[in-house]
Structures are given as structure tokens and as C-alpha cells.
Amino acid sequence: MKPVSAAEFRVNETDRGWVDAMCTPHPIAAFTDKMTLTGARERIAKKAYIRAKGYPSVPFDGAQERLKANAAWRVF
């Protein structure tokens, strides 16, 4: 998949060229292949969830609320 342009993410005009130059195509399989959850992430000592508030997203907002109640996660 082609990278999304920095402008769509509201990156300031000064930095858009640099951000676009750093982006690379993303394999479509990341969206279509089934993933296997092993529970290994629960063994990660420090976990953080960072929510970029400038972009409306019901699923990301829901995840943020769930993780706020989980002492294993730092939420920003």
C-alpha cells in the first residue's frame, strides 16, 4: 500500500517533505493475514498507549478508556 501523505495527518507544512520522504509502502498482508496472539505482550514490563487527539476515532478512544483502567499501561 502506498504511504498516506503527511498532509492527511496534518503535519505542519515545514516538516511534510521530510515525513513523506521517510514513509515507505506497507505490505497489504499486514491487514489481511490472521494474527496469532500468544499472550507474550503481557510480559512486557513497560507498556504505553499514546492517543493522538487530533484525529477522531471511536476504536482508539475506546482502547484509551479501557487501558486507563489497567495499571500495567501508561496512557498519554
Image: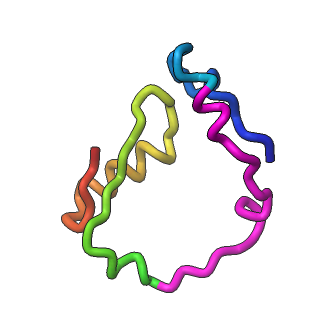
Instruction: Tell whether 3 sits left or right of 76.
Output: right
Q: Residue at x 33, y 81 (%)?
A: 43
What residue range appears in magenta? Answer: 18-38
Q: Residue furthest left?
A: 71
Q: Is residue 57 above or below residue 29?
A: above
Q: Residue furthest top?
A: 13
Q: Is residue 49 above or below residue 20?
A: below
Horizontal and vertical percent position of residue 74: 24, 55
Task: Say if the magenta span includes residue 33.
Answer: yes
- Residue 27 or 52: which is nearer the viewer? 27
Horizontal and vertical percent position of residue 76: 28, 44
Q: Is residue 16 above or below residue 57?
A: above
Colour convention of the picture? rainbow
Horizontal and vertical percent position of residue 54: 44, 26
Q: How many marks?
A: 0
Q: Residue at x 66, y 31 (%)?
A: 20
Horizontal and vertical percent position of residue 21: 67, 34
Would you identify the image quadrant in which residue 31 lies? bottom right
Q: Residue at x 50, y 31 (%)?
A: 56
Instruction: Tell whether 35 sits left or right of 74.
Output: right
Q: Is residue 8 above or below residue 28?
A: above
Task: Say if the magenta span includes residue 2.
Answer: no
Q: Residue at x 54, y 80 (%)?
A: 37
- Residue 40 or 11: which is nearer the viewer? 11
- Residue 73 or 10: which is nearer the viewer? 10
